[in-house]
Image (cartoon, helix red, strand yellow):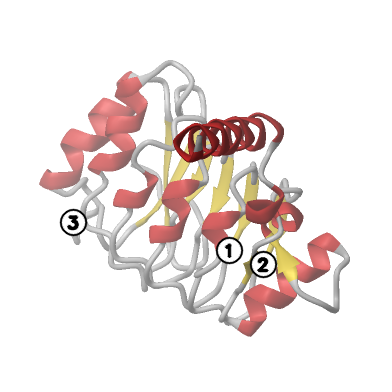
Amino acid sequence: MRRHAIGRIAVVGLLGCVALLMNGCPVISNQVVYFPDQALDGAVRAALNRPFGFLTKADVLELRTLDAAGLNISSLEGLENCRFLTQLDLRSNNVVSIRELAELHDLRWLDLGDNLVRDIEPLSGLLFLEFVNLFGDNQEIWDFTPLAANANATDSSLPGGVLVLPTRTTLNPDGSLAADFQVVYDQLVARGVTVIIADASNNEVPL
């Protein structure tokens, strides 16, 4: 008798879990999200019009656009929870790591110009990107193959879009394309991407 009762409890529990998965789990949606960087936290709160109180996963999933330019942001921790962002402006900050962006698969417009970014591998797999700005002579980006990989992966990533890159890691002193970048450049252009090389003042450098 006891064994049958335990079996019924297990079945009821399993059905309950299935119902939560189908209808959205309130426990998960009410989990608190933290942005340790106070400037980023302030930008998110301003975008959501939520200046006080805890922010939950349900709150930040409402974000579609975020303007966080020129706020001296150094950490993007917490931004990985804003999974429905389509437009993100992080221009003129102190961002080094962009690993959190790997979770933002809906991104179409991204401005990381004038930061301190070193590795853009997290952008690999963001197949809906149509505009990416990476200009700035303080950027330490030497490997642009993740962007070429995106462009080659699908018709919906970058082709027909715009890519703005810094001069220091793409051009030789004489203004010609650096050998390592030439291969990536050719692949991007072949896929219909408009590649703009911009100097520190964000002025286009003719090729």
Q: Work out how far the residue at label 2 is from the one at label 1, CA to CA, in angstroms.
A: 5 Å
**Along the polypeptide, which appears first: circle 2 or circle 3?**
2
Q: Quadrant of residue 185?
A: top left
Give me the residue at 24% from left, 28% from top.
Answer: 186
Circle 3 Cα neighbour tier, 10 Å, few/some/many (<14 / 14–19 / ≥20): few
Helix, strand or loop status at disc 3: loop
Circle 1 Cα neighbour tier, 10 Å, few/some/many (<14 / 14–19 / ≥20): many
User: Residue flagged by tag 3: what amino acid is it?
Assistant: Asn
Give me the residue at 76% from left, 74% from top.
Answer: 54
Q: Report the front residue among 167 and 14.
A: 14
User: Residue flagged by tag 1: what amino acid is it?
Assistant: Leu
User: Residue flagged by tag 2: what amino acid is it?
Assistant: Ala
- Cβ atoms under marks 2 and 3 closer than 8 Å: no
Q: In which quarter of the image is residue 135?
A: bottom left
Measured along the vertical axis of the image, is residue 48 above or below residue 103?
below
Residue 169: image x %, image y %? 25, 59
**Along the polypeptide, which appears first: circle 3 or circle 1?**
1
Q: In which quarter of the image is residue 18?
A: top right
Give me the residue at 51% from left, 30% from top.
Answer: 128
The residue to which callout 3 is attached is 172
Q: Work out how far the residue at label 2 is from the one at label 3, CA to CA, in angstroms.
A: 32 Å
The residue to which callout 1 is attached is 90
> Mark 2 or 3, which is nearer the eye?
2
Quadrant for the C terminus in the image: top left
**Along the polypeptide, which appears first: circle 2 or circle 1?**
2
